[in-house]
Amino acid sequence: MSQSIGQKYDRIAGWWNDHHQNSEYGVAAFEKALGFVGTGRRALDIGCGSGGRFIHRLADRGFHVTGIDASKAMIDIARANHPEMKFIANDIQHWSDMGRFDFIYAWDSLFHLPLEAQAPVLRKTCQSLSSEGVLFYSFGAGKPGAHDDVWHAMTFSYSTLGINENLRILMEEGLEVQHLELDQFPEKHAYIIARKGVK
């Protein structure tokens, strides 16, 4: 039986924590996204890993963060790193008790979802934003589809809906795109910042 994505990250949780606690990777984009957030202070970190650089910045701004990750080992470390925050060991595909958040972010995590799960999870995420809530996430900017890659001697799966389909779903869910950037060109990596309209 093949390992789940959570089990694969369980195997590298310690390495991940050591290399990402104080990394600057993605921080400039994250700070840009935070600039669009209003007064609300409820945040959801999808694929939070062991926590670290993003959660530290949110804590400094008075946010209460809920983190979710499919890796139990990552969640155990995150709880030790940020005992004041809430962490859930679960797959975002199956988590139904999401509630409402003012800021939802998913940096380099949603692209591990199977292709058929991309649209449902993105829609569920949009629907979990509070009025004027901000969504910030990265995704594959290539053609729609899926592929595998080997990392840490394990095979990891990746998929993307592509830029146009991501934009279509966001607009259908009532979000206004504030920023779209291919931030690692020529690599096919992009991020979006979008805000939910007032209801």
Image: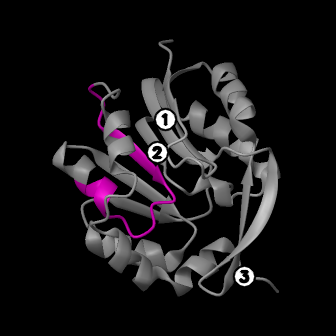
Q: Against 15, is 166 above or below? A: above
Which mark, by number, is residue 135? Answer: 1
Looking at the image, is mark 3 or mark 1 earlier in the sequence? 3
Looking at the image, is mark 3 or mark 2 earlier in the sequence? 3
Residue 60 picture location, percent across and down: 17, 48
- Identify the residue under disc 2: 105
- Identify the residue under disc 3: 3
Using the rendered view, name the quadrant where residue 134 is placed.
top left
Q: Residue at x 77, y 57 (%)?
A: 114
Mark 2, other Cα within 10 Å: few <14 / some 14–19 / many ≥20: many
Q: Is residue 95 shown in magenta? A: no
Q: Is the image coloured rainbow, by chain, by secondary structure, or in one colour? A: one colour
Badge 2 amino acid: Tyr
Badge 3 amino acid: Gln
Residue 146 picture location, percent across and down: 80, 57
Contact? badges 1 and 2 (CB < 8 Å): yes
Q: Residue at x 47, y 13 (%)?
A: 198
Q: Is residue 116 left or right of residue 44?
A: right
Q: Secondary structure at mark 1?
A: strand
Residue 24 picture location, percent across and down: 31, 58
Comparing 188 with 47, the one in front is 188
Using the rendered view, name the quadrant where residue 20 is placed.
bottom left
Q: Is residue 42 shown in magenta? A: yes
Alpha-carbon span between mark 1 and mark 2: 6 Å
Q: Secondary structure at mark 3?
A: loop
Alpha-carbon span between mark 3 and mark 1: 30 Å
Q: Secondary structure at mark 2?
A: strand
